[in-house]
Amino acid sequence: MTTPIESSTKCPTLPSNATSLLLECARQLEENGQISAARNAYQAAGLADDTPRGRVELAGFHFRTECFDEAGQEYESLLRLAAESNDRRLAEVARHNLAAILRKTEHSSRAMTLQARATADAISANGELDTTDMTGRALDAIDEGNFGLAEDLLLRSLTVEIKKGNLNGEAIDCANLGALALLRGDNTVGIRFLARAYHLHRRLNDRRNAGTDLLNLAEAFQNVSRWSLASRCLRRAMSQFESCGANQSLNTAHARLRELRQIQGVFDRDPLLN
């Protein structure tokens, strides 16, 4: 589930339509795999906008390209801005995404604190949790080893997302349910959920998350000694990560493929293991 300048002269504020054009350009460049040019366009939009919109999009781009330090700094700044302006919606976005970054960077304790605050705010405002809160709380429950609670929250969220027709939310919940099944040692259930998540993420052209689904599928296939399928998943994952600038995940996939080939080499060389 989730990531993210000072100049010597003051950057003038551009009209909102200019910001919109910059953001549209940035999205198109990212879609086409022109990551460096997209970064420049997102940064320009962030500087040009006198609202938080451009900076929120820049932070999201940093998250998607796994520049977690930059993403974290941007969301921290947005969280401060939300407190100063009493912008509840901005605080919600910044808090959820910052918690996601902290989980990615293994700062689970602070992530849980942020998630607890987000959950309390959601209940105060709406009287119930929305799917974003359910998913965030489920990920914290996984970190705590409370797999039963995590599964319950993810299944509840999945039901809501399917009813709403939210394919992105459905894909995220399926991916997390698949990963949870692998942690429980249930490779059959894991493969079913992860394959569903992968096809949804491909449909949405979400290459980073599609690559992550493939990484997890490779683990599941390796667990059941389906070496060829595991290798194929890793190669496809590398292609997905390379196309969207997710270099940390690309390196992980490279390392996993090397390890897999070493394991296959052992089995090929030792006839007693066949």
Image (spheres, rainbow, N blue to C red):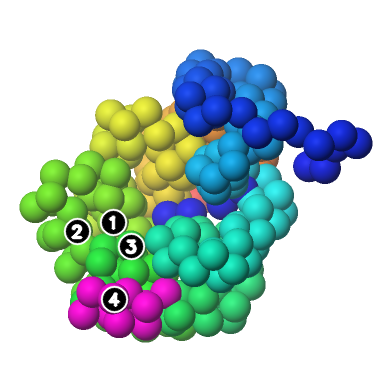
Does any portion of residue 246 appear in the rendered image?
no
The quadrant in which the C terminus is found is top left
CA gap, disc 1 and disc 3? 10 Å
- Between 259 and 210, the residue placed more toward the observer is 210
Within 10 Å of disc 4 (Cα), the crowding (few <14, some 14-19, many 20+) is: few
Instruction: Give amino acid for label 1.
Output: Asp
Marks 1 & 2, CB-CB < 8 Å contact: yes
Within 10 Å of disc 3 (Cα), the crowding (few <14, some 14-19, many 20+) is: some
Q: Earlier in the sequence, mark 4 or mark 1?
A: 4
Span shown in magenta: 118-127
- Between 47 and 273, the residue placed more toward the observer is 47
- Between 162 and 257, the residue placed more toward the observer is 162
Q: Where residue 134 sits in the image (x, y, percent)?
A: 30, 70
Residue at (18% x, 54% y) in the render:
161
Q: Where residue 48 sits in the image (x, y, percent)?
A: 64, 33
Look at discs 2 and 4 and give the one toward the viewer: 4
Where residue 124 is drawn, which disc sits there? none
User: Residue tagged by mark 4?
Assistant: 125
Where residue 158 is drawn, which disc sits there? 2
Q: Is residue 273 left or right of residue 196?
A: right
Q: Is residue 39 left or right of residue 123?
A: right
Instruction: Give amino acid for label 3.
Output: Thr
- Between 155 and 114, the residue placed more toward the observer is 114
Q: Where residue 225 sits in the image (x, y, percent)?
A: 40, 48
Residue at (70% x, 49% y) in the render:
70
CA gap, disc 1 and disc 2? 6 Å
Instruction: Give amino acid for label 2.
Output: Leu
User: Residue tagged by mark 3?
Assistant: 132
